[in-house]
């Protein structure tokens, strides 16, 4: 918990660990007027604390988030690998153009073990604003399918997501990313160790499908949300507007 981190030595101690391991740009100036390296040097570690480990003694070899790329996510996607052991999955796509449609399908028992649920047009531009797909993942878990069904979306997730789920798929569907070319039944493959997310289609087939693809009309035609959708960048670049 946050209080445990504070009692162990706080964020200063985290900075000190990064400094010790050579992962900190120590000359960066902070709001205190000192560099982050100077702040890190002043960290006071509580004797015997076990919360903030050294990089030479990690709990695990990698963190809880990994980036996958492939012909479905040329700019990358984010997968949380903490809390479950699924590292591979291959199955048919069940494609939905909104979170609501996917949620209804799960509720109605239309999603079967082995399926790959695809939710698109929920990215920074398409949403607009990258809505959180937690409702669908919770419904999948509630149906007892979180160990046999995967999900990919150009929307986002929270830390409460269960199972093998790829979010932030980029480029997003509304600008013609490969996820826009997916059809029901296409075979999608997750390979976390290889850091790959692919559909078993040739590059030529994907390009041919996208030739006849048309973007759906914007969900907002005027106002601040329409302006945001026009200006926002890819999730791979931070979904920034300036």
Image (spheres, grey):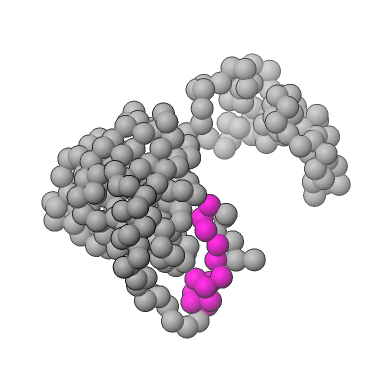
Q: What residue is shown at x 34% (from left), y 38% (from top)? A: 190
**Magenta portion: prevailing SS class:** helix
- Give percent across and percent down for residue 32: 82, 46
Front residue of this view, candidates 116 and 130: 116
Q: What residue is shown at x 30% (from left), y 47% (from top)? A: 201
Q: Can residue 139 be seen in this view?
A: no
Q: What residue is shown at x 20% (from left), y 39% (from top)? A: 114
Q: Report the side of 63 relative to 206 (left or right).
A: right
Q: Quadrant of the C terminus?
A: bottom right
Q: Is residue 30 above or below residue 46?
A: below
Q: In this view, does 242 lie above or below 164?
A: below
Q: Is residue 186 visible?
A: yes
Q: In this view, does 231 lie above or below 41?
A: below
Q: What are the residue bounds of the magenta stretch?
A: 224-236
- Give percent across and percent down for residue 62: 51, 27
**Residue 210 falls in image quadrant:** bottom left
Q: Does 234 lie within the magenta span? A: yes
Front residue of this view, candidates 232 and 48: 232
- Give percent across and percent down for residue 236: 53, 52
**Residue 15 falls in image quadrant:** top right
């Amino acid at each position: 918990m946050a209080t445990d981190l504070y009692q162990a030595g706080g964020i200063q101690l985290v900075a000190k660990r990064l400094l010790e391991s050579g992962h900190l740009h120590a000359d960066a100036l902070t709001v205190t007027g000192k560099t982050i390296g100077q702040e890190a040097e002043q960290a006071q570690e509580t004797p015997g604390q076990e919360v903030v480990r050294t990089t030479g003694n990690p709990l695990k070899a990698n963190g809880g988030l990994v980036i996958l790329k492939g012909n479905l996510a040329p700019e990358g996607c984010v997968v949380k690998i903490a809390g479950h052991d699924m590292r591979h999955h291959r199955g048919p796509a069940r494609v939905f153009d909104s979170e609501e449609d996917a949620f209804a399908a799960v509720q109605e028992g239309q999603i079967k073990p082995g399926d790959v649920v695809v939710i698109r047009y929920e990215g920074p531009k398409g949403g607009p604003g990258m809505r959180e797909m937690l409702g669908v993942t919770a419904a999948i878990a509630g149906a007892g399918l979180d160990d046999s069904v995967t999900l990919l979306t150009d929307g986002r997730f929270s830390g409460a997501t269960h199972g093998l789920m790829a979010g932030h798929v980029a480029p997003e569907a509304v600008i013609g990313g490969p996820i826009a070319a997916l059809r029901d039944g296409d075979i999608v493959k997750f390979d976390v160790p290889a850091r790959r997310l692919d559909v078993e289609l040739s590059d030529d087939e994907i390009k041919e499908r996208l030739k006849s693809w048309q973007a759906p009309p914007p969900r907002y035609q005027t106002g601040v949300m329409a302006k945001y959708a026009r200006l926002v960048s890819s999730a791979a670049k931070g979904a920034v507007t300036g």
